[in-house]
Image (cartoon, grey):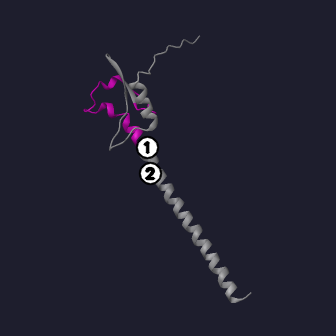
Amino acid sequence: MSLELKIIFILAFLVIILFLLWRRAASGLSNVKFQKQSLASKYGKLTEQFLPFLNQYPYDPQNFRFIGTPIDGIQFEDDGIIIMEFKTAGGRLSPKQQKIQELVENRKIYFKQINIK
């Protein structure tokens, strides 16, 4: 085998090794990013359960029921039932939450009693 061919094989081998190391590092970074987002999501869900107990909350927190998803909860008042979604830092409604808002605005909410025997 000629010297030039050996050098080409060695260079190709090094390129493959560097590529594999780069891929491993890139996937590790995306894994850290995913874990950070997941932790933030869990933290958000946990704090949402306590928001009705803040002084700024305009209703009686004892009448609030936490659901979690697709909306945060429901506030039961004597004069109405309020579907609640808490957002911070400029958060926006998800498409599913927007659909729920649309259904409420179009009065497409029903009460059903189901009797089980």
User: 16 above or below 61?
Assistant: below
Residue at left offset 46%, top offset 35%? 96
Place of residue 63 in the rendered image (x, y in percent of width and height, measured from the top left)? 34, 22
Amino acid carrying mark 2 in the image = Lys
Which image quadrant for residue 65? Answer: top left
- Specify which label sits upstream in the sequence, 1 or 2: 2
Q: Which residue is mark 2?
A: 36
Instruction: Say if mark 1 contacts mark 2, CB within 8 Å.
Output: no
Q: Which residue is mark 1?
A: 41
User: 37 above or below 69?
Assistant: below
**Farthest residue, direction front:** 106
Local secondary structure at mark 2: helix
Amino acid carrying mark 1 in the image = Ser
Local secondary structure at mark 1: helix
Which image quadrant for residue 61? Answer: top left
Verify whether residue 105 appears in magenta.
no
Residue at left offset 68%, top offset 84%? 6
* Magenta highlight range: 43-72
Q: Nearer the viewer, residue 97 or 32?
A: 97
**Farthest residue, direction bottom:** 3
Mark 1 burial class by Cα count in 10 Å: few <14, some 14-19, many 20+: few
Q: Which quarter shows the C terminus?
A: top right
Residue 68 visible, this orientation:
no
Which image quadrant for residue 53? Answer: top left
